[in-house]
Image (cartoon, rainbow, N blue to C red):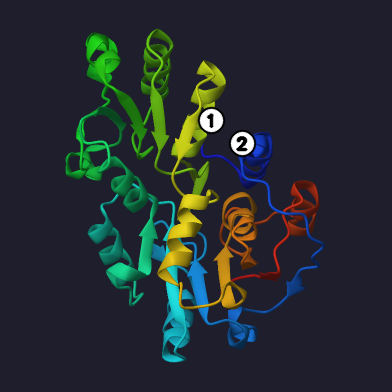
Amino acid sequence: MKSPSTLWAFDAYQRIRPRLPEPVSTSITPELVPSLAAIADRFDGFIFDAFGVLNAGDMALPTAVARFHDLQAMGKHCLVLSNAATAPQQQLVQKYRNLGFPLTQDQLISSRMLVTDALASAPEQTWAVMAPASAHADQLPCRSFVITSQIVQTSREKLDSADAILMLSAQDWTEELQHGLIDSLRRRPRQVWVANPDLVAPRENGLSLEPGHYAHHLTDATGLDTVFFGKPFSNAFDAAKSRLAHIPASRLLMVGDTLHTDILGGRCAGISTMLVTAHGALKGMDVNACIATSGIVPDFIAPEI
């Protein structure tokens, strides 16, 4: 399909809502603020989404680099919690350092990191991996091979022989590969892990389809359950809260651009949330209508950080 619109993405998230965590119901009226600077003194730890908050594709967003520096200069603890899974951890940290964000390895938790830790507990399995060559799937702590057109077309038995499926990155993924994977799982149902639950991600020129989109399509087609690593699921927020365990939950703020991942996940984790609207998943949308329709309510709303 062509590049999806923000409206399409919101509606797609709404369709999969029954598969997402459900927060404890509370009555919140979002506070509108001009930027994060207006409420920085209320929190000691900040958990940032990446795409749509800090960057769009390979471009740092206006004010984000300066705000990150300012918060750290104030002695605030900043953590990036990203559903990105294409790049290995060290490469992803370097990307953000190159964009101007003074990140250390300990300040970034990615979905790839979460799934890598989980894979290390089952090294005997062979995984068929959804990933481009640039994802360096050979660095994962398991036996694996990348799903390619050749495998789908002429080596179906190899795909069928894999013990499990890992949906790591949707870069270069095609409808042919998607249908080949679905056919294989119909022939032999197996466990499917998804290293990036996002349906879309903000890029320089629009939205890209991400592994979560293909994972839910696969679930609809096969009836198989999938295991997700990343926001809005608890494994991501448990890792972030553990990293910031010295800070009370009441002094933590999750900052994101997507209601169904960042804000929903933060709400379920029991921490405050701020929705940014200028560059990410809700760009150009009626934000109040989206909040009313989804029932996912942030504590704060700002155009950017």
Q: Earlier in the sequence, mark 1 or mark 2?
A: 2
Work out which residue is located at the far bottom of the displayed protein and give it: 74
Mark 2: few, some, or many residues within 10 Å (few <14, many ≥20)?
few
Could you tell me the amino acid type at mark 2? Answer: Arg
Asked whether the viewer can see residue 1, the reply is: no
Label 1 close to label 2 by CB (< 8 Å):
yes
Residue 113 shows in this picture: yes
Q: Which residue is mark 1?
A: 216
* The one of 98 and 161 positioned closer to us in this rendering: 161
Q: Could you say which is closer to the camera, residue 102 or residue 201?
A: 102
Q: Residue at x 63, y 37 (%)?
A: 12
Residue type of the residue flagged with mark 1: His
x then y, percent, for residue 193 = 40, 34
Residue occupied by mark 2:
19
Q: Position of residue 137 (x, y in %)?
A: 22, 40
> In the displayed structure, would residue 187 be above or below residue 224?
above
Asked if 103 appears above or below 207 in the picture, the reply is below
